[in-house]
Image (tube, grey):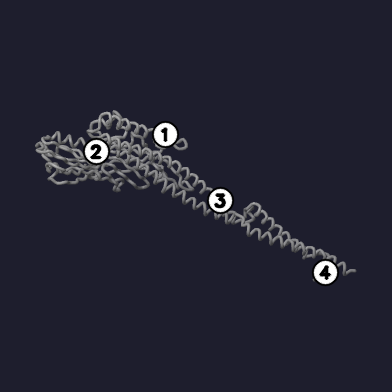
Amino acid sequence: MSMTIGSNAGLYQLLNAMNRIESERAVTMARLSTGRRINRGSDDPAGLIALNSLRSELASVEAAINTGKRNQSFLNVADSTLMEVGELTAEIQELVVGAQGSTVTAEEKAAYQAQIDANIEAIDRLINSAEFNGQKIFNGENRVNATTDDADAIRDIKVYNRNPGVTGKVSLTVTVSAAAMCACSDSSSGYDLATALSDDAVIQVTGKLGTAVITLTSGSNSAAILAAINAEKEMTGVSAFAGSSGRLTYASTEKGSEAFVIVSVISGPQAMVDDGATTKVCGSDAAVKVNGQNALASGTEVHYNGNGLSLSFTLNDDTPDTHTVTVVGGGAVFNLGTDLNSRAALGLQGMNTYELGRADLGYLSSLKSGGTNSLTASGSQALAIAKEAAQQVAVMAGRVGGFNRYQVGSTVDALNVAKEELSDAVSQIGDTDYAVELAKLDRQNIIMQAAVSLLSMANTQASSVLSLLR
């Protein structure tokens, strides 16, 4: 190696190496002090692009989780309100049953009626006051609106779900091909009402609503027999009338396959039952198609699920015919994901006592004092209405609970998993690995110390040349 003083290539190499080490150490120190592996684009250009994309997605997921939790809070308020209303409707059923029978005095019946009135007022108060963040829940603004071309034939339309992505009206063609029927005994073989009872008789009548044991005294004529059976129809769901040729005929007070009649003779003339035998007769449901698809019918209540819609309605007139139901829009819309395409609409029907019930039965509000179905009203269907109202509240509570658990809840759970994985990915790319960076810092410090020592040695080269000249 030549010894010169004009230039020192080794010195420059050492200086370049020291500059590189110092730059690396600056990056390492920045990572250790900020906790971030990427502090500028030059640290990792490709990683920065991936990091920004992941952070944006993570922010969307966190926003969706917060929205989902708010949705759950809204639905929990609705659920708890419906649970309270369900208990009140169940209590109304108990009060109606307790007020029946000849052993109940007028004062007791008045007390039962007063409790029913109080429960009905409590239901309306709960429904009208249920709100979340200043928004009423069951006052109708969260209802999915629907209309029909024949309001006399189709009533009580309730839309539970719809596709919020469909902005226009959705028309459904309802085709009724067969009417619902009551359960009815054979009127040609029943007891001949033209003949008074020759002996005392005790019969047991069972229907959809319950069972009653009826005592008929010897000598009872047709009017007395029919009156005794019909006096219990609110408890049994079975009425009696004179059929063909004046024969005793039993019939359910409601239509549908769930309605039935069972009559058995405990003692007395077996002729009180058709052909002297214990029989069970069931009704039949209406046959209905919606947009060509067979709909599920229970008596005159029709349920349809298809094309993102879930709804029910009552056939107030189930004569075979064709009608149109048009779903206009509305409902409580919930965002379930990170974009506007992941939305669902839940129809929260009005649940006040003027809407709980059915057009063909009556509504819960009619059970109040002075109403057409109060405890003192003639031919009251209070028990049937109370049961129908309780069923409707249970159905709505089930739908709200199911939506909360299986759509909102499962979405929040999935988003939480996504948040965990995205956070991990962001950490892998963007966070400082202190073990690695500290190891790098130790290496850099050692190399820098070695370079400083070598620099000192390189600077002595000129002195060596001077010694030769001497």
Q: Name the residue tied to disc 3.
A: 55
At horizontal 19% and vertical 45% (from top left) the residue drawn is 281
Q: Which sits earlier in the primary sequence, circle 3 or circle 2? A: 3
Q: What residue type is labelled 3?
A: Arg
The quadrant holding residue 206 is top left
Does residue 193 appear left or right of residue 159 in this picture? left
Q: What residue type is labelled 2?
A: Met
Q: Name the residue tied to disc 4.
A: 3
Q: Name the residue tied to disc 2.
A: 235
Q: How far from the left and from the top, in percent, is residue 346?
A: 40, 43
Q: Nearer the viewer, mark 1 or mark 4?
A: 1
> Counting other residues with Cα less than 10 Å from the Cα at mark 3, is it few (<14), some (14-19), or many (20 or more)?
some
Label number found at residue 315: none
Q: Are marks 2 and 1 in contact (CB under 8 Å)?
A: no
Does residue 102 appear left or right of residue 33 in this picture? left
Q: Name the residue tied to disc 1.
A: 129
Which quadrant is the C terminus positioned in? bottom right
At horizontal 47% and vertical 44% (from top left) the residue drawn is 69
Q: Which sits earlier in the primary sequence, circle 1 or circle 4? A: 4
Q: How far from the left and from the top, in percent, is residue 302?
A: 29, 43
Mark 4–mark 2 Cα distance, whole angstroms, equals 122 Å
Which quadrant is the N terminus positioned in? bottom right
> Counting other residues with Cα less than 10 Å from the Cα at mark 1, is it few (<14), some (14-19), or many (20 or more)?
some
The residue sitting at the right extreme is 470
